[in-house]
């Protein structure tokens, strides 16, 4: 399988992040930052603006690259998903939040509160970076995840338990 290029929109409002609960795979039923595939002939900034508007009703006014995320989902020896995701930090936006058919819920959540939620692994790692947990001193953060899909739920639970113990609660 060839890697697919996608974009994500990290929308912050004070100490809150915008998340959508995904209806479809990968990561169906998990909370994630809005985003999706880059279409043929589309620039990355165009793609993130389009995806944000389609999925949330928000128009990105000012954005900048934040992280390059690799997500590889495997089943046994085969690769089921391989995405290279360029996440953009949306510094300014306009419009009212609304969800579309690709999600089952949407909302802004405090960053630390979000870490208690059933987050997609790459979203959890992005929030860690935003909070300075395990952050590296780079202009653009590089995040990688290789996950056996049959163990995805268990891996999310394990990460949540580790974070809770490390932070002494996530208040």
Image (spheres, rainbow, N blue to C red):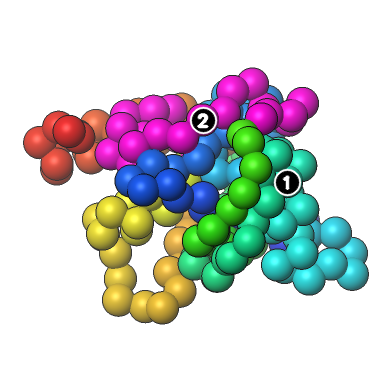
Q: Where is residue 7 in the image (x, y as percent from the top left)?
A: 66, 58
Q: Tell me where residue 86 sits by quadrant.
A: bottom right
Q: Which residue is drawn at the image coordinates 63% and 61% (left, top)?
A: 61
The residue lying furthest to the right in this view is 41
Which circle marks residue 61 in the picture? none
**60 w.r.t. 148: above or below:** below
Which circle marks residue 53 in the picture? 1
Q: Residues within 10 Å of mark 2 (few under 14, many from 20)?
A: some
Q: Where's the N terminus, which quadrant?
A: bottom right
The residue lying furthest to the top in this view is 104
Q: What element carries label 1?
A: helix
Return the residue nearer the eye: 81 or 94.
94
Return the residue nearer the eye: 51 or 118.
51
Q: Where is residue 31 in the image (x, y as percent from the top left)?
A: 51, 32
Which circle marks residue 107 in the picture? 2
Residue 33 visible in the displayed image? yes
Quick check: is 108 in the magenta stretch? yes
Q: Position of residue 98 (x, y in %)?
A: 66, 30
Which comes sooner in the sequence, label 2 or label 1? 1
- Extent of the magenta region: 98-120
Q: What element carries label 2?
A: strand
**155 w.r.t. 52: above or below:** above
Q: Which residue is drawn at the image coordinates 22% and 38% (left, top)?
A: 162
Q: Which residue is drawn at the image coordinates 78% and 71% (left, top)?
A: 43
Residue 79 visible in the displayed image? no
Q: Where's the C terminus, which quadrant?
A: top left
Q: Where is residue 59 in the image (x, y as percent from the top left)?
A: 68, 51
Q: How far apart are marks 2 and 1 (CA)?
A: 14 Å
Tell me how many marks there are: 2
């Amino acid at each position: 399988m060839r890697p697919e290029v996608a974009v994500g929109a990290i929308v912050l409002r004070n100490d809150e992040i915008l998340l959508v609960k995904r209806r479809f795979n990968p990561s169906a039923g998990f909370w994630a930052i809005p985003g999706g595939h880059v279409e043929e002939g589309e620039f990355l900034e165009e793609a993130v603006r389009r995806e944000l508007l389609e999925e949330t009703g928000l128009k990105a006014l000012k954005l900048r690259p934040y992280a390059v995320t690799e997500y590889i989902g495997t089943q046994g020896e085969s690769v089921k998903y391989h995405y290279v995701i360029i996440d953009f930090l949306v510094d300014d936006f306009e419009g009212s939040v609304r969800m579309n058919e690709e999600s089952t819920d949407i909302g802004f959540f405090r960053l630390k509160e979000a870490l208690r939620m059933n987050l997609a692994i790459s979203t959890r790692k992005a929030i860690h970076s935003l909070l300075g947990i395990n952050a590296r001193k780079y202009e653009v953060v590089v995040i990688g995840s290789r996950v056996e899909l049959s163990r995805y739920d268990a891996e999310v639970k394990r990460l949540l338990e580790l974070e809770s113990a490390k932070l002494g609660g996530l208040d």
